[in-house]
Image (cartoon, rainbow, N blue to C red):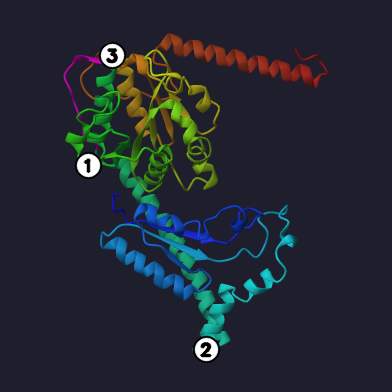
Amino acid sequence: MWKLPVIFVCENNLYMEYTPIGDVTAVPQPAADRASAYGLERIVIDGNDADVVYRAAQTAFDKARAGDGPSLIECLTYRHSGHSRADPAKYRPEGELDRWKLRDPIKIYRERLLQFGVAERQIADIDARGAQDRRRRNRSLQGRATAAARYHRHRRLRRWRLGMAELTYRDAVIRGIAQEMSRDPDVVFLGEDVAKAGGVFKATVGLYEQFGPLRVRDTPISEQAILGAAMGAAMTGLKPIAEIMFSDFFAVCFDYIANEFPKSRYMSNGQVKCPLVVRTGNGAGSRFGAQHSQSVENWCMMIPGLKVVAPSSPRDVIGLLAASVRDPDPVIFLEHKSLYPTKGEVPDGEIVDTLGTAKDSALRQGCDDLRIGADGAARARSRGEAQGGTRH
């Protein structure tokens, strides 16, 4: 719909985990046969022929760079080994593996090079130069990523100010998003009906007019699409704020929340960051019905790598939203629906809080005391167990 310069590639190795795809679906090409539903051309190629793949990719690159939108390429290939050690690969049809080994892409390309008169020694030289080029390219990419991070960290920040006012919680959400979008052009906002319509709770009114359609985007009614787009944007340098209309709908896209967002840093050994905020309306009391009135913060609080924020006043909405947007990790931002009409005094100027730190000094000291007491109890319990004592 947005004509983004994206190339989707499906490497179809003809199997699920252990089972042939043809045994479980009536769609012969699982990617290409669905392409027309999205207005994409159906492209199926021999994924084991490097030249064929190169030409198809080049056509897709040219299309994307010309502004003509995405392409979807399904490359037919084969998985020589099992999915895991538990894979009953011995039950494959007799002769299937041998036939596909004849179509191994390295074998095909070596034979093609020899046909063109390229000797074995030249092929070895090409392999060595390719490995060297890959090492050089990886070092270059790491250097550029470090420089980009340094640039964003030290970039001068623009300030966005409003006069002292008593705001509703709803208006504080608008001001909080606007503060961060004005300060940092990398902050973008997306969700269902959030642009011209101003959101189902009218908590995004005016943002579309202020920041335009490139930074405030309406999405399809697909929580998976919203969070998938947000994650891709975050991994490539933007700072997205994604809205899931009702927190109950987390059940539809929970794989992103539980497995993708919070584990991206660990799975990439720190190379990939996911600085995004997922805003959502949470809680009961507004007569939206059983599937739109749940409090689901406990779903998120059990997940390592995920930060959960639930502001209780208009002032805290702005400060905590700013802290969430500027945090390098994914944050779930829960706005209780019954709080939207409530009012509170909000000071002038930029408001920024700190995640994980109590605002009140007495409360902060109390938390420290509890932590010290808990640590002492844990140490005493460990000593007792080491000495054979009874654990209570």
Q: Is residue 124 visible?
A: no
Question: Magenta part mainly helix, strand or loop?
Answer: loop
- Could you say which disc has been placed on residue 341 in the image? 3
Range drawn in magenta: 157-168
Give percent across and percent down for residue 12. 54, 61
Label 2, label 1: how many angstroms apart (C-alpha)?
54 Å
Establish if 384 lies above or below 265.
above
Which secondary structure lies at badge 2?
Answer: helix
Q: Is residue 308 visible?
A: yes
Whether residue 387 sits left or right of residue 125 in the image: it is: right
Label 2, label 3: how many angstroms apart (C-alpha)?
75 Å
Mark 3 and mark 1 in contact (Cβ < 8 Å)?
A: no
Q: Earlier in the sequence, mark 2 or mark 1?
A: 2
Q: Residue at x 36, y 58 (%)?
A: 40
For the residue carrying disc 2, how many other residues have a C-alpha within 10 Å: few (<14), some (14-19), or many (20+)? Answer: few
Which secondary structure lies at badge 1?
Answer: loop
- Residue at the limit of the structure toward the bottom, as seen here: 117
Q: Earlier in the sequence, mark 2 or mark 3?
A: 2
- Residue at the limit of the structure toward the front, as seen here: 26
Give percent across and percent down for residue 218. 29, 39
